[in-house]
Image (cartoon, rainbow, N blue to C red):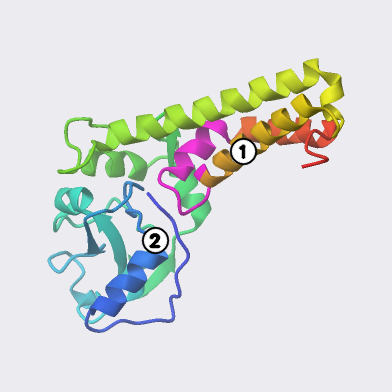
Amino acid sequence: MRYVEKNNDCQYGKITSKIKKEIYEIYNGLCSYCDSSADSWNIDHFYPQKNDFPELTFKRNAIENLHLSCYRCNIMKKDKSPKKLLSPNYYYSKDTNSWNLTLRDKISEEFGYLLFFCVSKDKKQGVNRAAEIIKMFNLNDAEKGKPYRTSLLMTRLSIYIIANRNIENIISTLELINKHKRCSSKQCKSGEILRKMLYINLLQFEMMIQESSPFYNMVLDNFGEMIADIYEIIKTGKVLKNL
């Protein structure tokens, strides 16, 4: 489930094309539920028109309740009342008749990835929200992908493979640099080539962990600690000194 910051001071009335564009830009064109590229998308009301919150009649178009959804997730969710789900940004409290902020840490504590599979990390008693999200949107089902595109699972797998290969290239380049000590010299032609290769691979990986990139959470969950160690090695070894 994708978390983004929103301006909660803004209250929408009728959902115009301008508002749709704004929601699209807030989520960088990525589905708020499955984190994939929302090529064919809808504006989803987290609390739908038909649910157990009649007091929300005049607040359903509030920005807190509007999310970008790909066609696939929109069909899966339909008009289901999300009693067991946390909104990517806010959830509504009947008791206070107000919106409460869903913290980024709250989602990361409940939802994660094991390789390219979505997993629940919620160990607390009560409703397992992550498991409900995975179940509702069939996030690990390869046969129920969005029409007219590669299935969700296979898309995640391909991105995982690319990230893994990128890490392998970075490590192998660092090993080559370590074997050829002269490569730290700017006058060394092979050293210059290796440093450029390292820089390109690091840049590619950095692009994959930008919040505007599909499944950036998956890449961070699987390779975040590893890339942090790599940067520490580079920093202490001054490999990129002359880049």
- What residue sits 36% from the left and 42% below the top? 130
Q: In this figure, which residue is indicated by the disc labeled 2?
A: 27
Q: Quadrant of residue 243?
A: top right
Q: In what element is the residue under mark 1?
A: helix
Does residue 198 appear left or right of residue 72 in this picture? Answer: right
Q: Nearer the viewer, residue 228 or 164?
A: 164
- Residue 212: in magenta span: yes
Q: Position of residue 168 (x, y in %)?
A: 58, 23
Marks 1 and 2 in Cβ contact (< 8 Å): no
Q: Quadrant of residue 66?
A: bottom left
- What residue sits 71% from the left and 24% below the top? 174
Q: Nearer the viewer, residue 86 or 241?
A: 241
**In this view, which residue lies farthest toward the top?**
179
In this picture, is 58 found above or below 164?
below
Q: In this figure, which residue is indicated by the disc labeled 1?
A: 200
Q: Position of residue 104 (x, y in %)?
A: 50, 55
Mark 2 crowd level (few <14, some 14–19, many ≥20, 10 Å Cα): many
Does residue 189 appear left or right of residue 170 in this picture? Answer: right
Q: Nearer the viewer, mark 1 or mark 2?
A: 1
Determine if residue 117 is in view: no
- Residue 216: in magenta span: yes
The numbered mark at residue 49 is: none
Q: Position of residue 225 (x, y in %)?
A: 63, 33
Q: Quadrant of residue 57?
A: bottom left
Does residue 183 appear left or right of residue 131 in this picture? Answer: right
Q: Nearer the viewer, residue 135 or 243?
A: 243
Q: Position of residue 98 (x, y in %)?
A: 37, 75
Type of the residue with mark 2: Tyr
Q: Which residues are magenta?
A: 208-224
